[in-house]
Every structure is written in C-alpha cells, then in structure tokens.
Amino acid sequence: MFTARHVFGAVQRRSFSASTRQASKVTVLGAAGGIGQPLSLLLKLNPRVSQLALYDIRLAPGVAADIGHINTKSEVRGYDPTPSGLGDALRGSDIVLIPAGVPRKPGMTRDDLFNTNASIVRDLAKAAAEHAPEANILIISNPVNSTVPITAEVFKARGVYNPKRLFGVTTLDVVRASRFISQLKNTDPANENITVVGGHSGATIVPLLSQSGYSLTGATLDEYVRRVQFGGDEVVQAKDGAGSATLSMAMAGARFAESLLKASQGQKNVIEPTFVDSPLYKDQGIEFFASNVELGPSGVEKIHPIGKITEYEQKLLDACLADLKGNIQKGVNFIKEKP
Ligand SMILES: NC(=O)C1=CN([C@@H]2O[C@H](COP(=O)(O)OP(=O)(O)OC[C@H]3O[C@@H](n4cnc5c(N)ncnc54)[C@H](O)[C@@H]3O)[C@@H](O)[C@H]2O)C=CC1
Ligand SMILES: O=C([O-])CC(=O)C(=O)O
C-alpha cells in the first residue's frame, strides 16, 4: 500500500532533525483541482514545509480550511483571485508548484491543451516573476514541453530569469517507468530507479532501461517503452472523460518538492529527473531537456549527461529531439505573439 514514507523517505524515520527546522513556504497555484488537492494534502504532511499557500480561481479557501485541520505544524492559507490574492499567495515563497489548467480527455494529445493552458501559465508566471522572482518554479500544467519555455520567456522579459530555478515536473514518467519494470520483473518498485530523459509527451519520453542493467528485447521492450511513453493516455482512457492522472501526479509532484526542500536544506546527492534549461542539446537548438539533475541550495546544481545508451535508445532519442524542438519553439513563439 502507498504510504507517506514512499514520498518522504527518510524524513518520516528521522523525524525532526536540524535540517527540517528551516522555514519553507510552498505555494500551489491550481490547488483546488484534481492534482492540486491531493498534492496540497501531501505537502501538509511534509514536516519540511512551514507555510502552505493554496491559490485557485475557485474553492481554494475551502480546500485550505479542510487541509488546515490536519495535525501537522505548517500554517495553511487559501487565496481567492481577489486583486491581492495571487500576490499574497506567492510573496515569500520558496517553491511554487503550478498544476493550474485543463486536463486531457480521450483522443486529445497534451499539445491540444496548449490553446487553453498557455495563457493560464503565462499569467501565473507573470505573477510569480513579480511576487516570487527567486522561488523555485515547478511546472506541472501541460503541455510541459511548451509551458516551461513560456515561463522562461515571461521571466526573461522581466529580467528575473534564473535557469537554475525553473523545472518542468517529469517525475511521473520515472515513477511509472519504475513501477512498470517492477511489474514485468516482479521486483520491489521502491528499489527501481529507471532513468527517463527528453520531455513529457509521447515520443519525447525516453526511458533508458539499459542503464539499469535490464536488457528487454523484441515486443517486450517495445511494449514497455510504449507503456512508459503513453502511461498518461492509459489513465485518460480509464477515466473516460473525467480527466487525467491526478493521484499519481500528486505523489510525483510532492516527491519532487521534497527533493528540492532536502537539497535547499543542505542534503547532498539529491538527484531527480526534470525538464530544465539544459546544455545537453543546445547545439541542436534545443534549449530545454529532461535528464537526471542534481539539486542544491541554488536549484539546479549539476545536469547529468545522458551516458551510455543502446542503438535502440538512440533511435528513441532522435525521435524525441525532433518533436521537442517544435514544442519548445511553440511556447517561445506564443510569448512573442501574446506577451
Ligand atoms: N506534468 C505531469 O506529469 C502532469 C501534468 N498534468 C497536467 O496538470 C494540469 C492540471 O490537471 P488536473 O489537476 O487534473 O486538472 P483540474 O481541472 O482538475 O484542475 C485544474 C485546476 O486549475 C484551476 N485553474 C484554472 N485556471 C487557473 C488560474 N488561472 N489560476 C489558478 N488556478 C486555475 C482550476 O480551477 C482547477 O481547480 C493539466 O494541464 C494536466 O494535463 C496532469 C498529470 C501529469
Ligand atoms: O496524460 C496526461 O494528459 C497527463 C499527464 O501528463 C500524465 O499523466 O503523464
């Protein structure tokens, strides 16, 4: 059964050590949604969080009142879209998680969400650039391959862009890759950590199974890769029009936030996959790429190289890069046209 220990790991066992005493304000924009609510719940359970600010265009004070009764120390506040609400939610924040926006329905791609979500993320990014320019910004809203470049452009236009503090949350791809291999191999998924690189949609999701010592072949390998690349579609279809992954995403988002908090509080060797401003394929005109990233007090500490991969994985990577370039450019163009 899933327990908080899977998300917070050692924190639960070490209880309140020195490193958990530092104050950390975490803000969730889109906090009343399918992801926002369970994500806020998991953040309330995290002893590293001292203040939790929940903002949404609807229902955030209600969600905050509910979660605020949980007997952990952090203070929870809900904010409505009043003139000062968003700014108040953001001010002083160390981590801003953004799951605001519409989810997919069956038959849609993540890119089909662009028209609605691009402007939602742009406007929230403007507020974050104004009120929390030094926070770590964690983008969950899809299409992540485009919403992260949108956020970067908004911050650049205001002169506050720090590439070390902007993250596209791709943790769910790694969570799925680990779970799916454990189902095939009958292992404990908690001990699996499959590297997944690229972006966060279909062909841009590239699991590097060979790096974990696995050598699946033929249809088994094809099916595994396809399941990781289209895990989101599996959930969209199963929910049959009622949305996409929310609970597993909440877990993945809470895990990423926890890793950032650990790293900012001095823990070493905290490594998470994430879609960041990356040097890895800049020579091919690709400004953002997901790979394993070592986190530190300043955000991105070190971007790990891809490492050794098989010919099969190289082909997946080539397909990824072609798609990714277009997705990133689309986000950049959007801000040029609709700043
Ligand atoms: N990065 C990833 O791995 C994943 C990303 N997602 C994406 O996360 C997003 C949210 O998904 P769900 O929570 O299921 O959707 P949802 O519709 O249940 O919730 C979205 C929330 O955003 C709020 N919202 C809309 N506009 C807003 C604004 N301007 N300011 C603040 N809040 C606003 C809504 O009121 C709603 O409460 C979708 O774009 C979805 O595709 C979903 C799963 C995984
Ligand atoms: O599939 C979707 O639309 C939501 C998502 O990003 C995921 O579950 O990976």
Image (cartoon, rainbow, N blue to C red):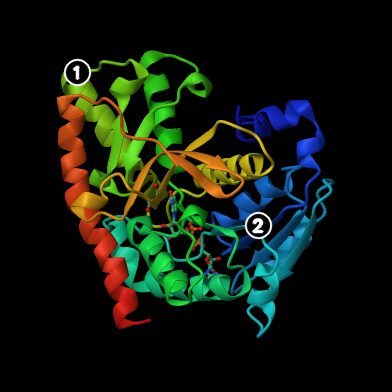
| Mark with earlier residue (1, 2) | 2
Do residues under tags 1 and 2 come within 8 Å of each other at their CB atoms? no
In this view, the residue in front, 244 or 197, is 197
Task: Specify the amino acid type for callout 1.
Answer: Thr
Q: Is residue 304 above or below residue 1?
A: below
Q: Secondary structure at mark 1?
A: loop
Q: Is residue 215 above or below residue 155?
A: above
Report the residue at 45% width, 57% height from top.
Answer: 163
State the residue position of label 1. Answer: 217
In this view, the residue in front, 194 or 288, is 288
Quadrant occupied by the C terminus? bottom left
Disc 1 CB within 8 Å of nearest ligand 2 atom: no
Residue 266: image x %, image y %? 67, 38
Residue lying farthest to the bottom in this orientation? 83
State the residue position of label 2. Answer: 94
Task: Specify the amino acid type for callout 2.
Answer: Asp
Residue 154: image x %, image y %? 43, 73
